[in-house]
Image: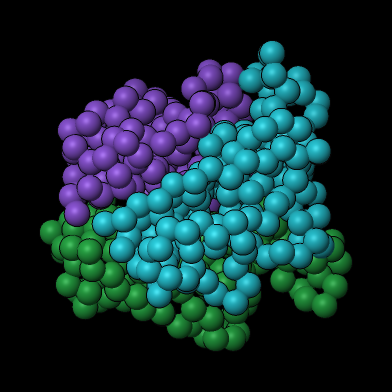
Chain colours: A cyan, B green, C purple
Amino acid sequence: MKSFRKELWFNTSKRRELINITHEVQACLAESGIKEGLILVNAMHITASVFINDDEPGLHHDFEVWLEKLAPEKPYSQYQHNGFEDNADAHIKRTLMGREVVVAVTDGKMDFGPWEQIFYGEFDGKRRKRALVKIIGE
Amino acid sequence: MKSFRKELWFNTSKRRELINITHEVQACLAESGIKEGLILVNAMHITASVFINDDEPGLHHDFEVWLEKLAPEKPYSQYQHNGFEDNADAHIKRTLMGREVVVAVTDGKMDFGPWEQIFYGEFDGKRRKRALVKIIGE
Amino acid sequence: MKSFRKELWFNTSKRRELINITHEVQACLAESGIKEGLILVNAMHITASVFINDDEPGLHHDFEVWLEKLAPEKPYSQYQHNGFEDNADAHIKRTLMGREVVVAVTDGKMDFGPWEQIFYGEFDGKRRKRALVKIIGE
């Protein structure tokens, strides 16, 4: 069994951003030399997400509106977590979007449907944060 | 390490449907000959889900009502994604239900609790779509 | 390839509780002797969750309030599932929080960011229930 590990780093200019990391994960897979196995990609922070969906700006806007409706950032005082912090909403938004994805590797490629793209979802940004790519297989 | 791959295809008559695929995944596991490992089952479309829950019609009705409350299909104009499409709600519903499940394989069986059943959740159906079953192990 | 399996059992005194199981999962990993691979931790019940987030009581309170807002326990009659049972809300709460986590193993350790902690989320407790830890690798 082979294994491969790499961290992807981000520093968003806005509090919330969705970043397409499909090519970075593909590059990891190529570098690993693994032909059959599984890829795990997870946020290493509990106010960020890794998820698979469409790379379409309208949908990304819809996600922003929907997440703000279900877990609004403000008023900060609505959350007990926000004593010394202001990011309780980011913990909840990441819960809705998910921490991680697991992707099949077949014939050295990510085994994806036609529109699947991997995103890093930042919900409390403006600082250096990271996601983990771990690949196991042969 | 052994690996196994199969696509499961669906063509629902309704826009939204939940389909129990536990037996199909079990058949894949039997065909693979893998005794210890992990199974990944994921939707290959970004408007569909694979999830684990109860095979109980009342609960499935409750999921439908709940998903329509949190991410209503109509009016279509409430979503920016719905310029040429009408399925923004399906992208969000699938996010709530999840893209994938990972299941342990022990002694050649899916290592499940008493009520766990795997479902394909279709949220934008009436066309041919698919889920991926990938198994790795020994 | 090595594999390891262990069940973690719980019997909460309240209907809903969040239990930090990070140390139990670390102990499983040490016992397995696996240095590189993947850990799957999943609830074996469909009214419970395994998820990764912060071990901070204020945030856990915020999750409780948020889950009750999005999928309230009462009135029981609002859910069709609640004919002979009263736990439809728990099925939905677990869907929001997620069934499972997959964690990378690197150099014999869980490959975590600074604040990642694993929780068992009970949403229909006061009885014996369990989570599964499955580790594969080398």
Q: Is residue C24 above or below residue A106?
A: above
Q: Is residue C60 above or below residue B23?
A: above
Q: Which residue is drawn at the image coordinates 76% and 61% (left, top)?
A: A59
Horizontal and vertical percent position of residue C26 = 29, 30
Q: Which residue is drawn at the image coordinates 81% and 26% (left, top)?
A: A75
In the picture, the quarter occupied by the N terminus of chain A is bottom left
Extreme top residue here?
Answer: A84
Horizontal and vertical percent position of residue A49 = 60, 45
Query: Does A69 sit left or right of C126 as displayed?
Result: right
Res A112 seen here: yes
Res B23 seen here: no
In the picture, the quarter occupied by the C terminus of chain A is bottom left
Horizontal and vertical percent position of residue B29 = 24, 71
Q: Which residue is drawn at the image coordinates 22% and 74% (left, top)?
A: B32
Q: Which residue is drawn at the image coordinates 81% and 70% (left, top)?
A: B82
Q: Quadrant of residue B115?
A: bottom left
Horizontal and vertical percent position of residue C90 = 46, 43
Extreme left residue here?
Answer: B107
Given residues B2 and A24, the one toward you in this image is: A24
Query: Does A112 sit left or right of C2 as displayed?
Result: right
Q: Quadrant of residue B106?
A: bottom left
Given residues A45 and B109, the one toward you in this image is: A45
Given residues A135 and A54, the one toward you in this image is: A135
